[in-house]
Amino acid sequence: MIVLYLIVLIVSFVILFKCADLFVTGATGLSEILGIPKMLVGIVFVGLGTTAPEFGVSVSAAFSGFSEMALGNAIGSVIADDGIALGLAALVAPAVIFVNCRILKIAGAFLLFIDFLAYFLARDGVLGRFEGILFLLLLVGYFYLLYRVRGLRSGLGVPSSYDSPSGSEDAVKCSRWSRLRRPILLFVVGIIGVVVASRFGVVWAAVHITELLRIPEIIIGSTVVALGTSLPEISTCITAARKGEGELAVGNIIGADVLNILWIIGVAALVRPIRVDVDIINFSFPFMILVVTVMLVSLRIGCRLTKMKGIILIVLYGAYILLTLLLFGRPPLH
């Protein structure tokens, strides 16, 4: 039986990274045709795509009366995305990853602000519907803020290098939208494949293999299950970095972090108020803020992500896993 699970695991990984390649190719195409900076494409479109699984799980949990799970899932995903996904992206990138300083400054400051805000609001032990509405309103404001960034505004409705300078305005628009079909198709097919391969392939097979090998449940929880929720971000970041699209990878992580806090926690709290465990207040929230701060500061230094900075992020995630097991005797909440 273990042979079957191994085959499923290997095939799922192949499908996962192939679909991630399609996803990144589609996102890059959208960036070039629409003239939108790649980092913004990563923050908005790729971020929305890769956090879709967490959103589905968290909202389902909230409707089932387990809204606390959404909070643990969101915080754990932010730590895993910043530590593992971005750390590995830095290591596999063929060169140093440079980022758009202006976009990083705006999006990074907003991310840090909402992290501290969520922590402050959670300290009374409850994230209620008021906080949920506030988070969703902040999300709308966040997207409007990104729209106001000159790089994005100038990209919308302006012919890119793909468009012919000659011809009527209608012909130019028709030409651009006809070129968008392939990137959109690759983007949609890619993200669906990434989500399906992650959820129903890699994680399913890995859990069964570890159970057959009699690996302790706590180890399964802290590795396979915990990282499984972040597989879309991890695979997309690694693929983007290897293809030389590191800025897309960085944008994906920043966008996913914001969405995990405002979108996932916001909707979950709106569905059912979240009771915040004291361990999350005293440990998980502060550690998440620490990881996000280290990630943003490292990116701001020289507006680039080096391999050494990637190693630091990975070590931070390892410390999170170790401290969680030592302090609480259980895997991180995901």
Image (cartoon, rainbow, N blue to C red):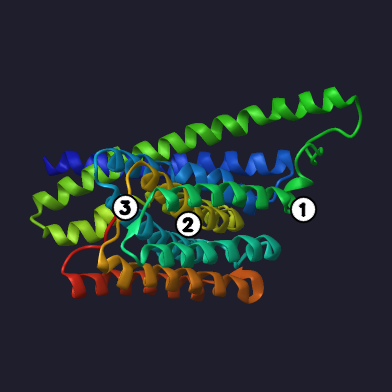
Q: Which label's residue is closer to the chain start, 2 or 1?
A: 1
Q: Badge 2: how crowded within 10 Å, few (<14), some, or many (20+)?
A: many
Report the residue marked by disc 2. Answer: 257
Q: Residue 163: x and y, percent?
A: 81, 34
Q: Residue 4: x and y, percent?
A: 17, 38
Q: Nearer the viewer, mark 3 or mark 1?
A: 3
Q: Amino acid at mark 2?
A: Asp
Q: Secondary structure at mark 2?
A: helix
Report the residue marked by disc 1. Answer: 150
Q: Is residue 96 above or below residue 195?
A: below
Image-based side of 17 in relation to 208, left or right: right
User: Which one is in front, 151 or 28?
Assistant: 151
Question: Label 2, label 1: how many angstroms apart (C-alpha)?
Answer: 23 Å
Q: Amino acid at mark 1?
A: Arg
Q: Amino acid at mark 3?
A: Ile
Residue at 16%, 42% in the rendered image: 3
Q: Nearer the viewer, mark 3 or mark 2?
A: 3
Residue at 34%, 65% in the rendered image: 124
Q: Is residue 49 above or below residue 221?
A: above
Q: Residue 108: x and y, percent?
A: 58, 64
Q: Which label's residue is closer to the chain start, 3 or 1?
A: 1
Q: Secondary structure at mark 3?
A: strand
Give residue 29's quadrant in the image. Answer: top right
Give residue 5's quadrant in the image. Answer: top left
Report the residue marked by disc 3. Answer: 274
Q: Residue 46: x and y, percent?
A: 54, 45
User: Which one is in front, 126 or 286?
Assistant: 126
Q: Secondary structure at mark 1?
A: helix
User: Which one is in front, 330 or 132?
Assistant: 132
Residue at 26%, 68% in the rendered image: 279
